[in-house]
Amino acid sequence: MPITPSAASALEAILLIRHEQLQTWARKGRLLAAAQEALMLQGTPKRSEQPIKEWVAGDDFRNTPEILLCPAADMNGDMGAYAISAEKICLNQDWLLAALAAQVISSPSGAK
């Protein structure tokens, strides 16, 4: 199944909203705190220092992995995956559309 235009436009709108949220959280220190709690880390992981500094400064996320929509058939039931060798994030388009419909994630037209 090819990528649908609705999934592609939804992802584009969501990423814009999420980038703004990440920048706000980075400025307030909440992004680092959430990463430390979720990953059970002590201190600041070296790999997170530079992106957080860039996001605080208003970077355009050019140094973050590209996010690709992938057909569900290619995702083996996963919602998403990170391809280390390609440095890309693959997001299951069917999951994205279902999550939007169920309001698990904010729709582009209204923040949750």
Image (cartoon, rainbow, N blue to C red):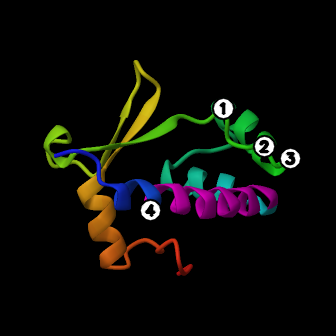
Q: Label 1 is placed on what type of residue?
A: Asn
Q: CA distance from mark 4 to mark 1?
A: 22 Å
- Percent x, y for residue 1? 16, 46
Name which residue lies at 27% across and 60% down.
Answer: 95
Name which residue lies at 63% across and 44% down.
Answer: 42
Q: Residues within 10 Å of mark 3 (few under 14, many from 20)?
A: few
Residue named by callout 2: 59
Name which residue lies at 36% across and 72% down.
Answer: 100
Q: Residue furthest right?
A: 57
Residue named by callout 4: 10
Q: Residues within 10 Å of mark 2 (few under 14, many from 20)?
A: some
Q: Is residue 97 or residue 56 the one in the foreground?
A: 97
Q: Is residue 61 above or below residue 20?
A: above
Callout 1–callout 2 Cβ contact below 8 Å: yes
Q: CA distance from mark 1 to mark 2?
A: 9 Å
Q: Label 3 is placed on what type of residue?
A: Ala
Residue 37: image tag: none
Instruction: Identify the magenta region.
Output: 10-27
Q: CA distance from mark 4 to mark 3?
A: 26 Å
Residue 22 inside the magenta-drawn segment: yes
Position of 74 with respect to 20 (left or right) is left
Please report whichever mark, 4 or 3, sits nearer to the chain's N-terminal start. Answer: 4
Residue named by callout 3: 57
Q: Is residue 82 or residue 102 the one in the foreground?
A: 102
- Percent x, y for residue 60? 73, 43
Q: Label 2 is placed on what type of residue?
A: Asp
Residue named by callout 1: 63
Residue 2: which quarter of the image? top left
Which of labels 2 and 4 is toward the front?
4
Which of labels 4 and 3 is toward the front?
4
Secondary structure, mark 2, is loop
Q: CA distance from mark 2 to mark 4?
A: 22 Å
